[in-house]
Image (cartoon, grey):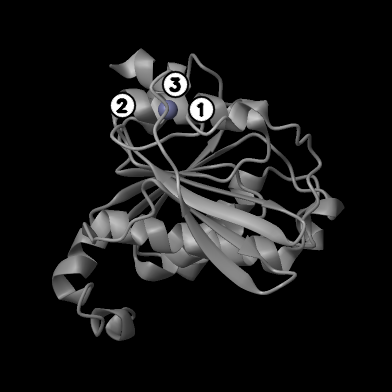
Amino acid sequence: MRYERQILIKQVSEAGQKILANSNVCVIGSGGLASPVLTYLACAGVGTLSLIDYDTVTDSNLNRQFLYQEKDIGKPKVQIANEVLSAFNPEIIFHPIYQKIDKTNITEMIKDADVVIDCVDNVETRMIVNRACLQQNIPLVEGGVNGFYGFVFAIKQEYPCLECIGYGNTKLKPPTAALGAVVGVIGSLQAVECIKILLGLEGVLYGKLLNYDGLIGSFETVEIQKNDMCEAHLFVN
Ligand SMILES: [Zn+2]
């Protein structure tokens, strides 16, 4: 009964629901993007969710990171997310991993994932995640925000990655300006892309950068190209 309404969607159906139940998704970062991502994937019945983060809750998180409340300040986010999501949907298996990601440990942490979702707020970690997913050929859903602007796209070996589009040169430094409602839009879109990938649906945002401008209320999708000189891609070929 829990999934009655989404089983009505022909692209999901009972067969798709079983696929979701047997799926394993790894979410990296447990902040503003991860709140809608984890909530909607748990709602949708994705069977196994891993969450990697080493941060604790602070009061400045609470304008957008709705998994946490004031009483959680000072506690590890993965611990609170585990409690909230397990109560929300006891059918799912949740793996909270309280660890900082680096080049040496990421391979092991994501190896069982069908999809990885990047919800971090710094360029350095994004680049590590990007390379690790390319190397292991695991689909990666990217998303980011800056004020009223946000973007989403999906990556795998045959398609452009973060390094292809020069994301490593971005000058953005944390803390990034973030409005909770905009973060919610982008995180929700990441969850949609993840579910499409798990179900094997067409139309995934591979090679397509979806830009959202909340100030003028527009979505625009632009094609992006693989860069033949991309070091991340050369590394895996
Ligand atoms: Zn690339």
Q: Is residue 53 left or right of residue 221?
A: right
Q: Dividing the picture into quarters, in which one does residue 8 lie?
A: bottom left
Residue 126: where, in percent of width, then height?
Answer: 57, 32
Q: Residue at x 45, y 60 (%)?
A: 191
Q: Secondary structure at mark 3?
A: loop
- Residues under numbered marks 2 and 1 in contact, where contact means CB atoms less than 8 Å apart: no
Q: Is residue 42 left or right of residue 79?
A: left
Residue 137: where, in percent of width, then height?
Answer: 29, 31
Whether 12 is drawn above or below 72: the answer is below
- The answer to whether mark 1 is within 8 Å of ligand 1 is yes
Whichever of labels 2 and 3 marks the residue nearer the N terminus, that label is: 2
Density class for disc 2 (Cα within 10 Å; few <14, some 14-19, many ≥20) is: some
The quadrant of the image that shows the C terminus is top left
Which residue is disc 2 drawn over?
136
**Discs 2/3, front:** 3
- The answer to whether mark 3 is within 8 Å of ligand 1 is yes
Which residue is disc 3 drawn over?
230
